[in-house]
Image: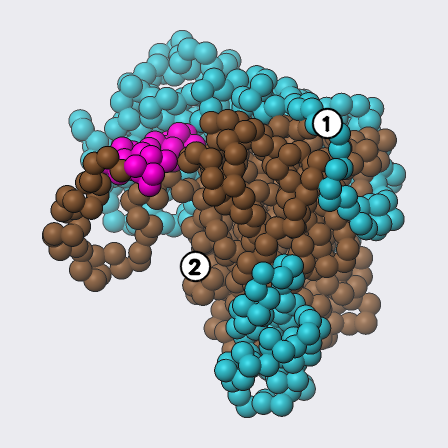
Chain colours: A brown, B cyan
Amino acid sequence: MSNDSAPSRRGFLTGALATGGAVAAARASAQAPDPAITELQPWMQYLGDGVDARPYGSPSRFESHVIRRNVEWLTADPVSSVNFTPLHELDGIITPNGLCFERHHAGIAEVDPSAHRLMINGLVDKPLVFTMQDLMRFPRENRVYFLECAANSGMEWAGAQLNGCQYTHGMIHNVQYTGIPLRLLLEEAGVKTNGKWIMPEGADASAMTRSIPIEKAMDDCLVAFKMNGEALRPEQGYPVRLVVPGWEGNMWIKWLRRIEVGDQPWHHREETSKYTDLLDNGIARRFTWEMDAKSVITSPSPQAPILHSRGPTVLTGVAWSGRGTIPRVDVTLDGGKNWHEARISGPSFDKSMHRFYFEFDWDGTPLLLQSRAHDSTGYVQPTKNALRDVRGENSIYHNNGIQTWLVDERGEAENVEIS
Amino acid sequence: MSRFLKVLVPATAGTAGLLTLSYIMAGHFVTETPPSPQAVFVTAANAQGNAAPEPALSPQPPVPATARDGGYGLGREALAEEIAAWDIDIRPDGQGLPAGSGDVWTGEEVFVEKCAACHGDFGEAVGRWPQLAGGMGTLERKDPVKTIGSYWPYLSTVWDYVNRAMPFGDAQSLTPDEVYAITAYLLYLNNVVEDDFELSDESFAGIEMPNAEGFKPDDRPETELAAFAGDVCMQGCKDDVRITMRAAVLDVTPGSDTPDTDVAQDTVEVESSAEPEPADDENAARTDAADEASADQRPDPELAAAGARVFKKCSACHQVGDGAKHRSGPQLNGIVGRSAGTVEGFRYSSAMEEAGANGLAWDHETLAAFLADPRGYIKGTKMAFSGLRSADDIAAITAFLEAQGD
C-alpha cells in the first residue's frame, strides 16, 4: 500500500497517455492512429467475471490508490489515532462508506448486534433497555450530514504543514444516515423536568462519553444504524451511533450503548482535557460544539495536480457549515486579488457538504487558489490569520481558515500561506 | 407527483417558495409519498440554468417521524443491577463516586505497575503517549504542555477516565481503591497534595485543581460570528500577494521524499491521544478442546494465524515482522530461542535483564509461563499487560511469534 498518491495518480495517467498519445497533441494533430482504438483490447474480446464473482463489490483495481491514509507521526499508536478521507479523489457530496475517515480512541470495537443494548437512564420517568430489534420498530428518518472532527486542519495552526487536502481537510465525511430521532427515544423514557443534559456513552474500550444539552438532543440528533443505505461500518460505530448534526465529530458517539439524562454536564475527559480550545491568553474555550463554515479546493490540490496543458480546467471543492447550508462559495485564482462566485451543484442540505465548481481556461502560469464559503447565517469563512488574531496558535481545534494552494507552471500544487 | 413538481418549480420565484411548496404538498397528500428533497433540488437546479448559484433549501426530512401518544411501548424497564453495571460516570460534584480510598504511596506502586509503561514512572510520558504531570505555567506560551496538573479543571475527570478507560487495553479492570490510589499519586506528581495524602470519596470534595478557573464558555457568537460576516471584496482586493510559508519546506507529508519526523514533532501541534486499545474478544480463540500447544518444529500455519489475531492485544506496545521497531515494548522478531532482555536498543527493566543474565531464554514453556502472568513470572517487568488467560491463546501467539523468525 503505497503512500505516494500524487506520483501514482500521475504515473497512472501518464501511463494512459503513453498508450493514447499525448493528450495536448492528440486533438490538434494526431499523427498516428490511437492504439486504444485500433487495437483489440482484452476486455473487448474475452468474457469477464459473472455475477457473484464479487458478491460485495469493490472499486476497479485502477482505483486502488483511493484509500484512507494516516500520518504516522501524529499519534502514539494506531488504535488511538485517525486517518483521512481522500477528498482529492471524490466528487459529488456523498462520501463512500469505505473511505470515511476513522478516529478511534480504543480501536474498532467489533460489536455483536445480538449482544448490543441501548440503555436510557438517569433523570427519566422509566429507565429503559432496547435491543437492536426494539430500535428497528421506531419510526426512522433519512438525512444527510457532514461529520467533521474538531481537529480537522489542526496541524495547520502554526502554518502550512501537510501537502494534500486529504491530510489538511480529510477528517470529514458526508453520509446519508437512517436513524431514529433521539427525541422519540427520550420521550419513550420520559425526561424529567430537571433533565437538562444527556451523556451518550460508547461500548468500545474507551467508553467514550460527551455531555450534550437537552435542547440539541430533542432537536435534530439521530440514533443511526444505516449509512448510505447499508449497515454502519464497524469503524463508524456498528451497530448504532449517535448523529449530532453540525457539531464536532467527537460527540457522535459510536457503538452507542447508553444515554444518561442529568441536570448538569459531566465535564469528562473529551470535553475538558481534549476538545477545548486554548487561546493565547492561557484561557480555554469549552463546549465549542458547532463547526464553523469551511471550504477547501479538492482539485487542483497537492495530491491532485493539473495533468494537462493550458486550456479548459475544472476547479472543484467542498464546503459545509454546522449552522446551516452553503448558499455561496467564492474562489480566487490569484491569491485573493480577484474573486469569482463558484457554481454549486448537487443537493444543498442543512449541515451537509456542498460541492462547488469553477471552470476556467488555465493559461499555464502559476496560480494561488483559495475558496471562501458563505453560510446561510451570513457567516463568511475567515482567513487563517484572522482566526489567529482572535485565538492565537494553540487551540488545535476548529481551524476553519481559508486554505491556499500554489499551483506551479507544471501543474503541481503545494500547501502555502500567503500575505 | 414529480411531473407536477417540474411544472411548478421553475415558476416559483425563490427558495422560500420551494420550501413552502414541499410543505404544502406534504400536508395535502398525507397518504402519498412526500417529494424527496433530492427531487426538489434537481428540478430547481435545472430551472436555475446559468443564473447565480443559489441552491434550493431542501427541508430534510419533509415529513418528520412523530411521537405517539403514550409512547411506542418498546424496550423494557432497565433493572437496577443493569444500571449499576453501566452507570459508572462521575461528575465534578462527586456524584457517582463509589466508597473507597487510596493513598499516594499505594498509588505509586499501582501506577508504576500498570501505567508507567506509557506514561513514565513520574507521568513524564514515554514517546508520544500523554504527559500527565508538570507543564505548570505553560498555557500562554508556544507549545503549551497540557497535563492533569496544568490543564484539567476537575479531579472527577481523572477518576472517571482512569476508571472507565485505563489501563490501556485492559479497561475497567481496576478496583475503586486502585483508582483512588492512582488519582492520589497523580495529584502528588502535580504538586496538588503532599505524599501523606489519602484520596477517598470523602476527601474528594476538598481538592481543587490548579486550572479550575482556566475555562470559559464558547464565546464565538460574541467574538467571531459578527466579525466574520458581511460583505466581501470581489475585485481588486489586494495590490500584491506574497507567499509567507510553504509546506514543502517542512516536508512532513506521508509519502514525501525526505520525511523528517523530528521536525514534525517539534513543529506541529496536534492532539496526541493515548487512549485504550481494543480488548479482543476474550472468548474468540478460547476452546476447551485441544492442548496441542507445543508445536514441535515449524509452527502450525493455522495456529500462527490465530496467533496473529491474539497479537492485536500486544500490538499497542510491540511490533513484529518486517521493519519492526521498539515501541513502549521491544520488537519481537526472533524472540523464540533468544535470551531474555537482550534485544539491542531497548531499555529493559533490570528484572528482565537479570533474568536473561541468569539464563532465562524464551521457548514455548517459558513464554507460556510469562504470558500467563507477566508480573508474577518476572517480578519487576515493565510489561503492564495483565496476561493471557487462555492456554490456546498462548499457544497461538507463540506459534505466531515463532513464524515471524528473525
Would residue A6 be counted in the magenta stretch? yes
Q: Is residue A348 visible?
A: yes
- Residue A276 visible in this rendered orientation of the protein: no
Q: Is residue B332 left or right of residue B249?
A: left
Compare residues B230 and A384 and report the one nearer the observer. B230
Query: What residue would you read off at disc 1?
Result: B240
Subunit bearing disc 1: B
Q: Residue furthest front?
A: A29
**x then y, percent, for residue B398:** 30, 31
Residue that label 2 marks: A112
Q: Is residue A157 left or right of residue A15?
A: right
Distance from disc 2 to disc 1, alpha carbons, whole Å, reads: 60 Å
* Magenta residues (range): A1-29
Instruction: Provide residue B270's location: percent of width, then percent of height.
Output: 64, 31
Position above or below: A318 against A133: above
Image x and y of residue B209, in percent: 83, 36
Q: Amino acid at mark 2?
A: Asp
- Tell me the residue at 42%/42% (across/down): A67
Cβ–Cβ below 8 Å for labels 2 and 1? no
Judging depth in this view, the residue of A338 and B27 nearest the camera is A338
The kind of secondary structure element at disc 2 is loop
Tally of numbered discs: 2
Which residue is drawn at the image coordinates 72% and 59% (left, top)? Answer: A376
In terms of secondary structure, where does tag 1 sit? Answer: loop
| Magenta stretch encompasses residue B278 | no
In the rendered structure, the answer to whether residue A35 lies left or right of residue A234 reads left
Main SS category, magenta section: helix
Residue positioned 57% across, 42% down in the render? A297
Q: Amino acid at mark 1?
A: Asp
Query: Which x, y percent locates residue B293?
Result: 25, 36
The quarter of the displayed image where residue A218 is located: bottom right
Q: Residue furthest left?
A: A46
